Amino acid sequence: MKLVSYTANGKDAYGVVAGDGIVDLSARIGERYPDIKALLAGDALAAAAAAADGQSADEALDAVTYRPVIVNPDKVICVGLNYKAHREETGRAPTDNPALFIRFADTQCGHNQPMIKPTASDSFDYEGELAVIIGKPGRHVKAADWASIVAGYAIYNDGSVRDWQNHTIQWTAGKNFPATGAFGPWMVTADELGDPTQLELTTRLNGNVMQNTTTDLMIFDIPTLIEYITTFTQLRPGDVISTGTPGGVGFKRDPQVFMKPGDTVEVEISKIGTLTNPIAAE
């Protein structure tokens, strides 16, 4: 099942992707579960599937405005330097534990929506990533039990404002300009996607391949990340873990390549789809 958040006819909604359309769940079960986060918190994926079963699409995919998959996550936790090729291109030494940072929920945009190059910088870089969406509360979750709290997966483009990211050893400023993190186009439930280590990730800028990897090459895999993160915080339904980007980022190319207004960036992950965003000026 694919779950999507969107706006149509002036109303925010969510639903199940059915072919080239959407079955509107907001109109069917929205009083109990007003958004995907509430659906997950209510352990209601089965109710969503039942509500959509046999129904005709209410909206065409190409007629809606996409919103971030989870529009109101409590936490968006991003993993830095989680592929060897990216760690090596940055010149960073290996670490014993994952490098984590936080992205604010209000810096996100949806599929087909513009990622915004800020006025303050010309160093706006792409970072294609696999996003893990949490479905059940979890604290002190052992790596062996990681799947018990995962609802599904989506695509993330953790757009980075490189000069601001490198102002200090802390990355917060460069990771939280408005509309620099793209999240979509939908969530594929864990049962439909299967093994998240067997995916191919490709980032294209204006049609040119900039990044390509397979997710089995993560340094810290998803079970390890979940055990580490839930040791210091409780993950809640709707929380997001963006698992890191591979090598090929723009600021480490020669010459450097940064996104500029008029560009189009795409992140494609097998079994999920393609997250596409135009680049616009602030």
Image (spheres, rainbow, N blue to C red):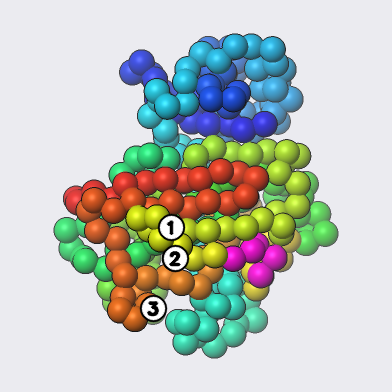
Q: Residue furthest front?
A: 207
Q: Of 39 and 249, which appears nearest the observer?
A: 249
| Residue 45 x/y as whole percent | 69, 28
The single residue placed furthest to the right in the displayed view is 144
Q: Please tell me which residue lies in front, 215 or 72.
A: 215
Residue at 58 percent across and 71 percent down: it is: 82
Return the mark for residue 252.
Answer: 3
Alpha carbon separation for disc pair 3 and 2: 11 Å
Report the residue marked by disc 1. Answer: 204
Secondary structure of residue under mark 2: strand
Which residues, given as a range, are shown in magenta? Answer: 213-217
Dot 2 and dot 1 residues touching (CB under 8 Å): yes
Amino acid of disc 3: Lys
| Residue 208 appears in the picture as rendered | yes
- For the residues labelled 1 and 3, the Cα–Cα distance comes to 16 Å
Position of residue 190 in the picture relative to residue 209 (left or right): right
Identity, as a three-letter code, of the amino acid under mark 1: Arg
Q: Which mark is residue 210?
A: 2
